């Protein structure tokens, strides 16, 4: 099999700090690097958000 046409590099998953919505019914979260406020509120439901670490595909 020839793979030389497949130039796509595998995306590495890295531990990423995120803000996650505290509401259990809500899937809202954002990358900490992309939040502009010190304590952002959820963009979906305006609840508070808590910091947590998730394993996400690395952004380049
Ligand atoms: Zn929310």
Image (cartoon, rainbow, N blue to C red):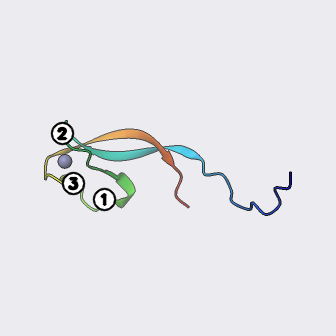
Quote the CA–CA distance across marks 1 and 2: 21 Å
Residue displayed at 35% across by 47% down:
18
According to the picture, the residue beneath numbered tag 2 turns out to be 25
Mark 3 vs mark 1: which is more N-terminal? 1
Q: Is mark 2 within 8 Å of ligand 1?
A: yes
Residue lying furthest left? 46
Q: Measured from the top left, where is residue 28 in percent x and y?
A: 26, 49
Per the rendering, the mark at residue 26 is: none
Where residue 15 sits in the image (x, y, percent)? 49, 41
Query: Is 8 situated above or below 47?
Result: below
* x 21%, y 54%: residue: 40
For the residue labelled by badge 1, is the local secondary structure a helix, a strand or a loop?
A: loop
Circle 3/circle 1 CB separation < 8 Å: yes
Whole-number angstrom distance, CA of label 3 to CA of label 1: 7 Å
Could you classify mark 3 by the number of other residues whose Cα lies within 10 Å: few (under 14), some (14-19), or many (20 or more)? some
Determine the CA span between mark 3 and mark 2: 18 Å
Q: Would you name the residue on which mark 1 appears?
A: 35
Label 3 or label 2, whichever lies nearer to me, is 2
Which residue lies most toward the front here?
1
Kindly tell me whether mark 3's CB lies below 8 Å from ligand 1: no
Q: Residue furthest right?
A: 1
Q: Between disc 1 and disc 2, whose residue precedes?
A: 2
Label 2 Cα neighbours within 10 Å, binned few <14 / some 14-19 / many ≥20? few
Residue pictured at 17% horizontal, 39% vertical: 23
Q: Secondary structure at mark 3?
A: loop
Residue 24 percent coordinates (x, y)? 19, 36
Instruction: Confirm if mark 1 falls within 8 A of ligand 1.
Output: no
Q: Secondary structure at mark 2?
A: loop
Q: According to the image, label 3 marks what residue?
A: 40
Mark nearer the viewer, 1 or 2: 2
Residue 6 image-quadrant placement: bottom right
């Amino acid at each position: 099999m020839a793979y030389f046409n497949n130039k796509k590099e595998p995306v590495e998953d890295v531990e990423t700090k995120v803000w996650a919505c505290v509401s259990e019914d809500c899937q809202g979260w954002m990358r900490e690097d992309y939040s502009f406020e010190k304590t952002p509120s959820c963009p979906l439901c305006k609840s508070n958000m808590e910091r947590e670490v998730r394993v996400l595909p690395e952004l380049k």
